[in-house]
Image (cartoon, grey):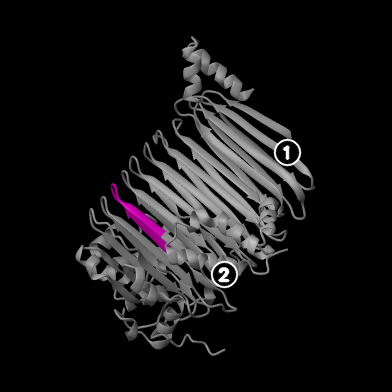
Amino acid sequence: MRQQVIKLKVGKLESKGVAKIWRINKSNIKKRLVMRAVVEEGGYLEMKGKIVIGKNIADVDVFLEQRVLLMGVGARAVVIPELEIESNEVKAGHATSVGQIDQEQLFYLTSRGLTRELAVKLLIEAFLA
Amino acid sequence: MAMKNKAYVFRAKKGLDQGVVEQISAKKQEPEWMRDFRLRAYKIFLEKPMPTWGADLSGINFEEIYYYLKPNEKVERSWDDLPKEIRDTYDKIGIPEAEKKYLGGVKAQYESEVVYGSLKKSLEKKGIIFCGMDEALLKYPEMVKRYFGTIIPSGDNKFAALNSAVWSGGSFIYVPKNIKVGLPLQAYFRINSANMGQFERTLIIVDERAEVHYVEGCSAPIYSDDSLHAAVVEVVVKKGGKCRYTTIQNWSTNVYNLVTKRAWVEENGLMEWVDGNLGSKVTMKYPAVVLAGEGARGEILSMAVAGKGQNLDNGGKCIHLKPNTTSRITAKSISMKGGRSSYRGLIQISPGAKNARSKVMCDALILDGKSRSDTYPTNKVLESEAIVEHEATVSKIGEEQLFYLRSRGFSPKEAETMIVNGFMEPIVKELPMEYAVELNRLIGLQMEGSLG
């Protein structure tokens, strides 16, 4: 499946916004939009993603994925995934999550001898890879 | 057609001005603070602009509406004491029968006023209060004054202001500490005349570790002119308390249904909104929970079936103010025959609400190419130690499911109805039995001829 990926890093005390609108105007489309961001201490992110499917469209399968990692005290995010669907021979969806680094992954890496700092750095790198 | 709306003892003139607001207050012989509350709200209503988002509200003509219509002198304790046409209306809907079988108490509102009220003796003895809002204002003025308009202030939105200015009827419930109300308490709202505005006002207070389930139903006959239903519902759930509020909205398709509902939930309390929307021309309703105490929980089940000419814009809001609060929203919608259903929601994790968790799931079915489905969720995560998840899907009925059922000998219509009922099941199963049966039947009826 075709995939478009948008990645973003919001540094300490930075404020950033990202928005992407997909308008599906023809039939026979299968694709996925991925938006990922890491927000550091005191950072602020606004992320908006939208999929619009007009009338008389068929055989479309589109998905929007938004993932945000909040990495420190005061990190904030406003995430808005939207769908507007006017055809029925289609499939559309989205998934959004805002959260922290997986504690189990962190535990595993530190148990292998990595410092916490390095483990976090690697996990963020992987998240945005 | 001869209007049946002769059945009233007083009707305010058409349209709204300060005089009408004062007249409603005077008719009800209200205390001065309530009169002032109404007049302040009326000013706010005039100042507030119409919402520019959501459904199209340009069809509402505030001058063409009757704001107050009193159908009967007093609240009756026996169905037999009601005027015949009002009694017949409720008989047809089946309220008196349901009351005998499975309800703890009933309030029936006809146009602007509660015309019938009952509460089981055993519940009354435990100190539970269940009465009309107007009655509560006279009988329990301190309690009403303390909470009225505190969860939803008049300035919240234009229609909350309108309700605050001209409210009439609605329920007042108080459940004392540690008391669990086993049987649901039910209210039934009926608009029976054309151009009617119904503005009921409900206040529910669930004290510490108490529990209650409140059920409301709404209906109206169809007229060519539009009616307006703008209710305000405020719920307070104290420490460890639990409240479930179930709505089955089946207004006729000439009703604008613009309702503000919000619950304030304290430590370890639980608020559940079960919100079923089948009828109305336009609905804008987003039941909200404010999780104001540590460990408070909120759950919203939202359901919409939008058919021809209907725009159902509903969803839910969860505001997390304190640590360890959790919320979940499950929304299911069906659009068919040119109908439009939208999920609109807000999750807000306020700064300091550490370990708050929220999950939202929206599923939508579009049954034909004329219909529309939208999802408009906003996730505001202002605390870095919190987790918010949101998922949504929009699709048609699965070909494979349909094929399987057809191969087992079901007609296309039966198969489609079964799949739709199955899709709704997670929400329908939360309804009281009688409603669940009725709902499946209503969905089946609406779907008639929807096969493309």
**What span is colored magenta in the figure?**
B232-245
Query: What amino acid is found at the position of numbered circle 1 in the picture?
Result: Lys
Q: Residues within 10 Å of mark 1 (few under 14, many from 20)?
A: some
Left or right? Give the position of A45 relative to B104: right
Quarter of image, res B106: bottom left
For label 2, the residue is B60
**Which element is circle 2 on?**
loop
Q: Is residue B200 magenta?
A: no
Q: Which residue is mark 1?
A: A31
Chain where mark 2 sits: B
> In the displayed structure, does residue B312 sit left or right of residue A20?
left
In the image, A125 versus A43, the foreground residue is: A125
Res. B291 image quadrant? top left
Q: Which mark is residue A8?
A: none
| Image marks 1 and 2: residues in contact by CB distance under 8 Å | no
| Same chain check for tags 1 and 2 | no
Amino acid at pointer 2: Ile
Give me the C-alpha separation between circle 1 and circle 2: 41 Å
Residue B434 pos. (x, y %): 44, 67
Locate residue B53, reporting x and y percent.
58, 55
Count of all numbered marks drawn on residues in the image: 2
The chain that hosts pointer 1 is A
Indicate the position of residue B104 as horizontal and vertical percent values. Answer: 31, 67
Residue, x 32% and y 44% (percent of image)? B268
- Left or right: residue A61 versus residue B298 is right
Q: Quadrant of the N terminus of chain B?
A: bottom right
Q: Is residue B273 above or below residue A74?
A: below
Note whether B79 is above or below B298 in the view shown. below
Residue in front for this viewpoint, B222 or B95: B95
Q: Secondary structure at mark 1?
A: strand
